[in-house]
Amino acid sequence: MKSRTIKCLFVALCVCVFEAQAADKLKMELQPDGMFINNVNVAVLQKIYEDFGYTDFVAKDHTIPSIFLESMPIDFNNIKNKNFRNRLFITIMAPLALKVNEEIILERVHIIDLKKTFEEKGKLSSKEEKEVEDLAVKYDVFTRMKGKERYDILFKNLLLKVDQIAPALLIAVAAAESNWGTADEVKQGNALYKLKDWFTDKGIKPKGEDDDSYRIREYPDLLSAIRDYALKLNSDVNFQHMWVARAQLRNHNQTLKGRTTVNGMVLGSPLENYAGLLNYILTFYDLVNIDETRLRNISFSED
């Protein structure tokens, strides 16, 4: 589709959806990396998806348009058909999970560039050193070594940790932890994964529990929640088996898929048979298709 046609389509779409949902303060914002939407209802969201050719997360051309919801549709929990609701949840999550992976890969490429610079020059600039040290803190990489040995260790461990996560896995975990996006914590603070912060009064107070020592972490949008969980998977030592399996796949030029890494999630939740539950979700909804999909840019520039 030509960019001029897409631009005209978007203008017509805006008129349509604002007329359909004027009272709900619908927000649609075009940014260089895609369309960001908030305060949308299910009917209007379906119209938007349809107009951009996104009718199913199982795409024949293995692409999904860059349409990102900031929060779940305002009437999402009113959906009666369970199968429709679950598939819509996956449809919403798919581009978000793919975007998080794009960001991780860009960060990994930057680490590779820094490593190459260090190997070629034998040193880094003060700015580059700070970037490496900040990444080490972010991904919980630590060593007491100094000089060349220090950076050899930091780069080795960063490249093990900073790598893509199967989008299907991110979606399956979100489905399991948030009851397919219907949990109160999702509506209150986009808490898809119910990550906990201890000994604080900031966040969402858990309902029905006597334990007042923690709060559920809240986020400004769904994308931030997925980013934070992806960081947990790439930094928490409990998931080191997943890092190793992922590295082996990369060494053999194989595609990372949710089913390949699901067994590394045994310690990911107190839920019983957690890996089995995730594997069921991955299999029943054919989420492997999303692992083989990429984002499709939405361009609004003139020809």
Image (cartoon, rainbow, N blue to C red):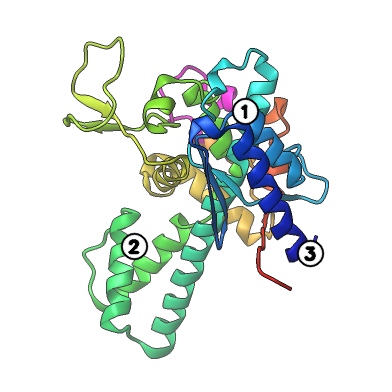
Q: Amino acid at mark 2?
A: Leu
Q: Is residue 136 left or right of residue 64?
A: left
Expressed as whole percent of the image width and height from the top left, the position of residue 233 reads 44, 44
Identify the residue at image location x=70%, y=40%: 49
* Residue at which label 2 appears: 135
In the picture as drawn, the residue positioned furthest to the bottom comes out as: 121
Quadrant of the rendering where the N terminus is positioned: bottom right
Q: What segment is highlighted magenta in the picture?
A: 265-278
Residue 195 forms part of the magenta stretch:
no
Nearer to the camera, 135 or 65 = 65
Q: Secondary structure at mark 1?
A: helix
Q: Amino acid at mark 1?
A: Val
Crowd tier of the residue under label 1, counting other residues whose Cα lies within 10 Å: few below 14, some 14–19, many 20 or above: some
Report the Cα–Cα distance between label 1 and label 3: 28 Å
Q: Amino acid at mark 3?
A: Lys
* Residue at which label 3 appears: 2
